Image (tube, helix red, strand yellow):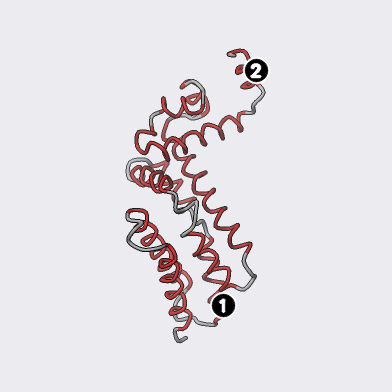
Amino acid sequence: MSVARKVRYERRSAGDRRQELVAAAIESLKRLGHEGLSVRRIAARAGVSIGLINHHFPNKDALVAESYRQFSRELSAGFQAAVEKAPREPRARLSAFIAAVFSKPNLDPQVLTAWIVFWGLFRQSPEMRRAHQEEGRGYGALPGILIRDLLKVTGKSRFRARVATIGLTAMLDGLWLEWCLDPKGFRPAEAVALCEDWVERVTASGP
């Protein structure tokens, strides 16, 4: 058995191995929260030695920061896919994005568990702060693009795209977090309706 594993490892590229370690770190954080930060636990989930993690990443912060990047990109890719399936009209694309935020997998409680760990590391880890600046909160640049496209069509300039994007993302984040903390407080459909109403009010404002 050990020989088979060794041969399997030798045939993997360094990039593939790094991706496997990142995936193991993400699953460890989603399932165990802060306890999942343990390099020993991550190594066990990946089925490798701690030494192999040290070989691919200079320290634990680097591994966790890379996990944040991958976690954020995966969520962003899901939102982008939902938008691409929608009709081409900017309003329909924005609606598809809002609906995706309040749908699985983003409503998986383990997603919040992982975010809590990542958020807790921002202040103490420069690598995490850099990763956050690069990747955002799982949305990427998508909300800003959708808002800009919609405002161009409506011809409404009173609300600048940047300000409108800040407002929408704050609303999405707040409602999503509130639902995750208390799923019985309101239905995801109600959160979607609130965001849709906000968008309607913004785009209906005067020039």
Which corner quadrant of the image does residue 168 belong to? bottom left
Q: Name the residue rendered at 44%, 71% in the picture.
A: 193
Give the residue displayed 60% in from the left and 18% down from the top. 5
In the rendering, which numbered label is found on residue 134?
A: none
Residue at image coords 49%, 20%: 49
Q: Is residue 128 left or right of residue 15?
A: left
Camera-nearest residue between 193 and 154: 193
Badge 1 or badge 2: first in the primary sequence: 2
Residue 8 horizontal/vertical position (percent) = 64, 21
In the rendered image, the quadrant that contains the N terminus is: top right
Query: Is residue 14 positioned above or below 191 on the image?
Result: above
Q: Position of residue 171 (x, y in %)?
A: 39, 65
Q: Quadrant of residue 96?
A: bottom right
| Side of 80 where 58 appears, left or right | left
Residue 203 image offset from top left, x and y in percent = 48, 80
**Viewer-closest of 169 and 196:** 196
Q: Are marks 1 and 2 in contact (CB under 8 Å)?
A: no
Most distant residue in the bottom direction: 206
**Against 131, is 4 above or below?**
above
Three-letter code for the amino acid on which mark 1 is drawn: Lys
**Which label was assigned to residue 152?**
1
Check disc 1 and report its element: helix, strand or loop.
helix
Horizontal arrangement in the rendering, residue 185 relative to residue 55 (left or right): left
Q: CA distance from mark 1 to mark 2?
A: 57 Å
Q: Where is 204 relative to 128, above or below?
A: below
Looking at the rendered structure, the secondary structure element under dot 2 is: helix
Name the residue tied to disc 2: 7
Q: Dot 1, how many residues are within 10 Å of its Cα: few (below 14), some (14-19), or many (20+)?
A: few
- Depth-wise, is mark 1 or mark 2 nearer the camera? 2
